[in-house]
Amino acid sequence: MQQNAPPPPPFEDGLPQECWFSVDVECSGQTPLEGSLISIGACLVDDPSRTFYIELRPDPSKAWGPKEERVHRLTRSHLETHGVDRIEGVRKFADWVRATGEAVAPESSPLFVGFNTPFDWMWLTMAFTEAGVRNPFGMSAVDLKSIYYTLHGGDNLTWKKTVKRFVRQVYPTDLVADHNALADAVEQAELARTLREVARKNRIPPTMPRGR
């Protein structure tokens, strides 16, 4: 595992440096209207030893999904006993993102990196709103599935073949991602570094539109 790895150098366009955060969440339902955000895991893409993990008490007014529990393996009773208040937990996460970004690259902007990002982003955006906390990522997010599809897309690649088991046939790993939010975030960080390097090697030079 990388230790104190510096952030990647900025591209040549002079835009502000970005600090990439790999983020994963586990939930008790399909949407925030149906269930609760129950755990958040995150790490820096370029230094996965810098981590965040928290388990949250479920909202008692929301249903509990037994199907989802079989995936994340966190019981409601465990979370009710050991979980942190969800408002407090979300605020801690936002504070960690800001503090970590400042420590690693003071002039950088945090960038949310996920695998099937719309799902995780949906839950965290709702949680930040509920907690009255400004989203530390603003509106900036990257989806690794979309990057993979762009790099390997073609007539023989459907969106269904961007699920993790197919991606890992192309990019094998020794890391175990088992729907623990932190383990998944660390595994995503490795994939993000790999895909970013592949993209750089195949990069098309940017072109600026000419003014009329």
Image: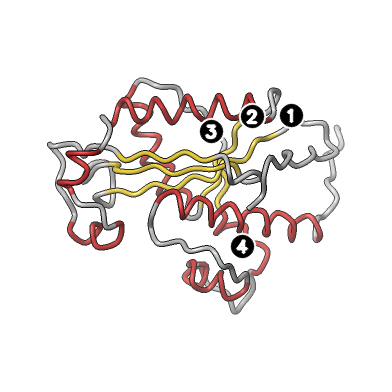
| Crowd rating for badge 4 (residues with CA inside 10 Å; few <14, some 14–19, many 20+) | some
In the structure shown, which secondary structural element does the residue marked by tag 2 occupy? Answer: strand
93 relative to 40, above or below: above
Spatial CA distance of label 1 from label 3 is 15 Å
| Crowd rating for badge 1 (residues with CA inside 10 Å; few <14, some 14–19, many 20+) | few
Specify which label sits upstream in the sequence, 1 or 3. Answer: 1
Q: According to the image, label 4 marks what residue? A: 148
Which residue occupies the foreground of this view, 48 or 159?
48
Res. 32 image quadrant: top left
Q: Nearer the viewer, mark 1 or mark 3?
A: 1
Rendered residue at 68%/23% (across/down)? 106
Spatial CA distance of label 2 from label 1 is 7 Å
Marks 3 and 4 close (CB-CB < 8 Å): no
Specify which label sits upstream in the sequence, 4 or 2. Answer: 2
Q: Nearer the viewer, mark 3 or mark 2?
A: 2
Which label belongs to residue 16? Answer: 1
**Of the residues shown, which amino acid type is indicated by label 2?**
Ser
Rendered residue at 62%/46% (across/down)? 45
Q: According to the image, label 2 marks what residue? A: 109
**Image location (x, y in percent) of residue 107:** 71, 23
In the structure shown, which secondary structural element does the residue marked by tag 1 occupy? Answer: loop
Which residue occupies the foreground of this view, 150 or 173?
173
**Of the residues shown, which amino acid type is indicated by label 3?**
Met
54 relative to 115, above or below: above
Specify which label sits upstream in the sequence, 2 or 1. Answer: 1
Spatial CA distance of label 3 from label 2 is 11 Å
Q: Is residue 31 left or right of residue 107?
A: left
Marks 2 and 1 close (CB-CB < 8 Å): yes
Rendered residue at 47%/38% (across/down)? 52
Which residue occupies the foreground of this view, 209 or 169?
169
